[in-house]
Every structure is written in structure tokens, then in C-alpha cells.
Image (tube, grey):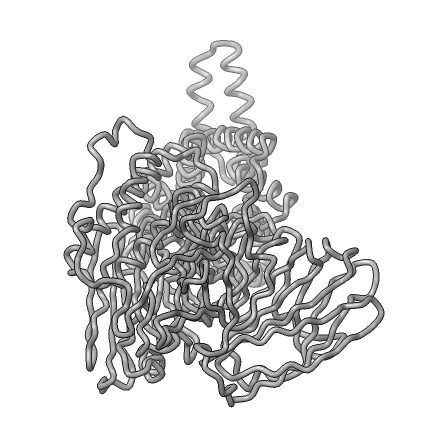
Amino acid sequence: MKIIWTFTLLMIPGVLSSISVTGYSGDRVNITCKYDRRYTDNYKYFCKGQNPGCTDLIKMDKKNGEKWVNAGRFSLYDDTSAAVFTVTIRDLSEQDSGTYQCAVDISWAEDVYSEVKLNIVTAYPSFDPCYNYTVLDNPWRANSSQLSNSYKCDQSVTWSGWYRLFINGLSAQIPDTCVAEYSCGTAAPLWIRGGHPTVQDGVVTRDVCGHWISYCCYYGAYPIKVKACPGNYYVYELVCPKDRILAYCAVVTNISSTHTTVAPETSSTVRDIKVPEDCNSQTPGDCFQNIFEQIENITDQELPLNTVTNILTVAFNASEKIVESSSSASRAELASYGNRVLKISEKLISTLVKSTETSASVNFTLPAVEGQVFMVGPQVTLNKIPRLAMTNSSVDIDLIGISKNNNGRTAAVAFMSYVTMENLLKPDFFNTSNDTIKTMMSTVISVTLPKTTNTKLTKPVNFTFRNIREFDPNGSLSCVYWNISEWIGDGCSVLKTNNSYTVCSCDHLSTFALIMQTSRPPESDSLLDLLNLVCVIVGLVFFSLALLTFAFCQWSPLVNNVARINICISLLLAHLLFLLTQPFLSLIRPQQVLCAVISGLLHFLFLSGFVWMFIEAVLLFICVKNLSKISSKKRMVLSTGFLCVIGYVVALVVVCVSVGLVPEGYGSKDCWIKIDKGFIWSFLGPVCVILASNTILFINIVISLNSALKSLNAEVSQIKQTKIMVFKTLAQFVVLGCPWIMGFFSNNSKVLEILFLILNSQQGTFIFLIYCVLNNKVREQYRKFFRCLCSNNTEDHSVTFRVITTE
């Protein structure tokens, strides 16, 4: 048997009070701390260690006033009306012995502390709660009593130890079926879920529920201890309710010493659960209210698997209808629906638990939910149960260790994975101090121990979640559990994670999920967008002028423009594709295949531009190496066809290999290469190799050119021409390479982002300036061409383009 010990401290400013508390291993203890009424709005917390420097275990803040706050084994409740806060520690062990502090946070002065010395022992007090209890005999608790002008509340009662209920001198019990609202002298009457035990069961744990807003378990569920006694009565280890409108209900009933009050046979309501015919003419909430109530009123302890799956199908179809029609539903409404679905699911899956001597399991898969139940009996031969695995998650739990303290009865674990639950229990319900985007990275799962007397975990439970959405390496992952109206991270931690899976560890069972927080993207800058548009258009104009110049001017046979022409073609097409797709990204993004194709084309075109830049550097290197042979017969070292094959096939091979290795790497939100999984290096890797190779080539070119200048006449025309080509190719290398190098470091820097935008979009302008405007012969042809246009002299115009350009 287990009892609760309650101790009260008076916290006086400037005075350090101290008491010694003794608790019992496996039990729990309540510590009540009084404080000055001046501090009702201050933060309250409970910490371990000496003052100052103690380690916080649980903390209450203003938004949690008048409510319980849970953090693993610890609970804290601040009753500001009484100027008292209560700390509960559950599942005590000898390691909990030590010094603690009840504290009030004083922002403008030193915090107020009260010292608690906690000693945990393994021995239990030698009394039976059946003969050591407090009588609870308020007449207003009767199920038949109606709410008066003012409702009663059990929150103000200091609960300690075991209680027996009486109504008008007759032995009573807490109802184990749903009680109507506004009865039992209160607004939301409390009842216990799961039925009463038999005398042979000893002390068991049952959940308490409060009926409110037409939901039988709107408040709950939190556990209490129950024991059936030989004199045909029950005793209860009651705890403080969570809200001011709650009170324990009582009903006069005799019990049997050999049978539980919950009958095991199948009720007719199970067979009759269906969607009402007039659903389409009602609001979804009203329409499916009846469905949920039918399911909640099922009293069967065991049901066949097909019956459970059929009921679950009806329930989740109902919840999907609610989601479809509740786009404007409030957070509280969605949370309420989600709580109902969770409770219904857990109730139904518990009916699959059946007594076994060794071990057994049950599995099912539905479109909206997957479920698995594993049971072990007293004769189990397994050292550990196998991992419970679903499509997107799995759980490791020490059910064998739990079953050893289960009084020789079957112990079971129920594991459920909800595919669509995030539509009700949204990731935005995870309250954090920072303004971030919350993304549900996993399916929502529930793990419970149905029909298991001992629910104490022997070790933390590990969950493995598959990331169902794109993993952001810059995001922050949190393992969270659902607590009535919000996601909370207390008691859970991330053990390890990668791009595909995340492993969480929690010290309790509940409903869990994995939520990622990412920074909100900066708001769109209209001026920057306009600058981008203008720069790209200007760059395209100069790309076109450079191409026309290379194509129609007559160049010297010594000048090979193949690489320059193809650089312009590649970059012109890439910038044109970028210009045409960016205004329509909102329409393109939903078309994943189209977005991936666009990103693949951009990858190919930009990469081919760098390959052609490398080819031009190689041609220049060969030209410089042949300077000593200027008197020999000149011939093309590499044919134009061969250069074109190299220039485009190399880029195509890189793109094809990238698609084969990581096909999902294309199609980011900007229809570019995704940065996760290192896939961006399919572009940056070849670019870095080409830039490094060009750097090495230019160093060799400079060395070879200096050597040639020493051995040849500096006035030789080919040497002068080669010097000019080296300068222009080096300038081209800087123009094409530097913007991308700058792009590596432009994250979160507005200045670098603008510089990258301008330099990258004006590559056509720089090429036109370097190879056309700075070429005297080309400028001469431009002048003649414009003079011909003005004078309409077509004959001279045709002659202009036969002037030979040697640079």
C-alpha cells in the first residue's frame, strides 16, 4: 500500500525556514509552501540543492497561474487565492533524498527560499488504508443532487491520505461511468474511468475524468489510487483537482467482493454506432457529437479486433469531417476535438488486451491510424519484448520489467500512430518564448499501459521517429507530449538525429510528437526584387550584344571564340530561365516535377558556363606554351565539335549522376538545388574544382609568358596579342568566379546579398565590356556600323563586318 505525505512550509521574506520530510520509495509526497500575498504574481519554482545555486526542477509562471504544471515526476500548483503553492513528487526513490528549496522569484531583490530536507526510505508504514481513512460525507456530492446557486469546489481542500465516501450515512463510491454536467453539487463532476477493482486486486490506479462541455473526459485524466475493502466499500487516495469547477461525485452502491463493477460482455451500443442520416443538414460539431458519445459510453472490457477497427474507422471519418469544415475553429475547439479522439482511441485499443500466461500481440492498420498491442503474462519467457514498430515510428519499452511488479497479472503496452492527428493537435500549439515557425516532423503517437496495475516505468522509453518532412539542419528539434491544450517538452529529450530519423527519450507515457522550430524567413523586399529584375534584364541585353558581336564580327584566325560564345549562351539561357520563372514561383512550387526540372536545367546551364570558362583557360594555356613556335605553321589544337562535346557533356554527366544518387535533391522552395543532405555540393563541388584548376592554370600561364618574353622579341605581334588575351581571360575568371565565391558567405548579410545579385546578374555586361568595348577593332566596327545606319549606306554596312579583329 502507498500513502501521500503532505508537509507545509511558511515562506517569510528574509528568513530561511527549514523542515525535514520523510517519503517512501515508490510513493509520492506533497510539499505545500505558503508565501506572502505580495508575491501572488511572482514566479514560483522548486529546485534541488543549496541556496543559492540550486538546480530548477519545475517552475510556474504567470500564464500558468491557477493550474497544475507538470515536469516529469514533478507537479506544481499555485493557489494564489490561498497564497500557497504545492509541489508533488511521484515515484520516489532513494536517489531523491537530499536538500530542496521552495522558492519565489523576486526580480528586484533576492529570491525567497524555504529549505526542505527530503529523506526517502524503503519501508512502508504498517497500516491498511481500508482501516485508516478519512470520512468524506458531504451530502451535496450525491449524484442525485443538482447544482445550487453556487457550485462546490474541491480545489480548496487540502487532500492527504485515503478517503471513504458516505451519503446520508450510507456507504458510497465515486461513479465509474460518465456523470451529467451540473450534478453532484458542482459544474463539472469527477468520475473514475476503467471500473472499480475487486478485493483481490488490492490497490490499483484509475484515471479521474471531469465532464464538461458535453465531453465526459474534458478534464483529465489524472491518476488516483483505489482499493476495494472486505466490508463491501471502497477507499480512495484523492488528489487536488485541476480546476475550480471540479468536485468528486458520489453514488450509493453496494459492491461485490469477487467481481468488478464493469461487466465484460459486449453491449448493443457497439453494434449500433454509425453516422446519423441527417449529418449533412447539421454542423459537423453537432452531427458527430452523437458519434463520440456513443463510443465514450461503451462499457465493454474486451472487444474483437474487427469491432475495434470498425469503430475507429467511424471515429476518424468523423474527425476528418470536422477538420474539413472547421477552418475557422479556435485553438480550444481543435484541442477539444483532438482530446476526444485520443481518449476514444486509447479506450478502444485497451479492449484488445486479453489475459495471457506467456505473451501475445495484436496489430491493425487503418488509413488514419495504426495500432499495436503487446501483452505479457506471468509465465513469459522473453528477456525483452520486440521493438513495437509502425510505418513512421517505433518504441522501445521495458514491459518485462514492468510486468514483474504487476501482481502476477497480464501487463500490456498499447502503441498507436495517428496519420492525420496534426490537423487537430497542431504544431503551433507548442508554446515557446521565441517567434518561430513550428513544423510537425513526425506522426503523432500514443503509448499507454492499459489494464496494467503497475504503471511505473523501470527505465525511460525511447521513441524513433521517421522525419516525414524535409529536415532543416538549422532548425531546432523538440520531443514533446500533449497535455490537454498544448504540446510540452518536459521530461523528453532528443538522443540523436539525422536527416531521416530522430530518437527521443521520455520518462513517462503520453501522446508524443516531434516538432521542429525554424526561423521565420525575412519579409519580401520589394526594392530588392525590383533591383533584381532590372539587373537581370540589363545583363540579358548585354549577353545578347556580346553574342551578336562574336557571331557577326570577322575575327582573326588566331582568335578562338568558341568558348566565349558558349559561355554567353549558357549564362544567357540560365538568366533568362531564372527571369521567366521567379514571378510564377507560387504557381510552380505545387508542381513538384516541373520545379525539379527547372532546378535541374539551371544546374546544367550554370555548370556548363563554368566548364566553358575552364576550356577557355586551357586554350589560353596551350596558346602560351606554343609562343616559342610562332614561326611554325598554325593549326587548331582542338576542333570546335570536340570542345562542344566537352563543354556540355561534362555538365550533363554531373547533373545525371546527381539525379541518380539523390533524385529528391532538386526542387527547393525557390526551384533551385536543395541545401540539405549536402546536395548543394553537386554544384559547388565542380565549381570549386574548376576555380582551383583555373587558378593553377593562370599561375602557369604567367610563368610561361614571362619565360617567352625573355627569349623572344617583345614587339612580336602574337606576344602582344597573347598578353591581351591573358588579361581578358583573367578578368573573365574574376568576373564569373568571384560572385559565386561571395555567394558562399552571403547568408543573413544584406550588403553581400545585394553585391552578389549585382555581380552575378551583370556577367553579360562585364563580358561585353572586356571583349567588345575594350577591343579597339570592335569599337571601330561599331562606329562604322552606326554611321552606316545613320546614312542608310547599306554597301558600307556590309563591308564593316569584314574588318578583321585580332584581339
How many labels sit on residues?
Answer: 0
Q: Residue furthest top?
A: 792
Asked if residue 634 shows in the view, the reply is: no
Q: Quadrant of the N terminus?
A: bottom left
- What percent of the width, then of the height, locates residue 35? 74, 63
Asked if residue 245 shows in the view, the reply is: yes
Q: Return the residue nearer the eye: 16 or 265.
A: 265
Q: Residue at x 54, y 75 (%)?
A: 4
Q: Return the residue nearer the eye: 492 or 761.
A: 492
- What percent of the width, then of the height, locates residue 100? 67, 77
Q: Residue at x 75, y 76 (%)?
A: 51
Q: Is 25 above or below relative to 777?
A: below
* Residue 484 placement, left or right of 30: left
- What percent of the width, then of the height, locates residue 219? 46, 53
- What percent of the width, then of the height, locates residue 519? 55, 50
Q: Return the residue nearer the eye: 732 or 508.
A: 508
Q: Residue at x 71, y 79 (%)?
A: 19
Q: Is 28 above or below relative to 180?
A: below
* Residue 258 placement, left or right of 43: left
Based on the displayed image, in which of its 4 quarters is residue 443 positioned? bottom left
Q: Return the residue nearer the eye: 471 or 558.
A: 471
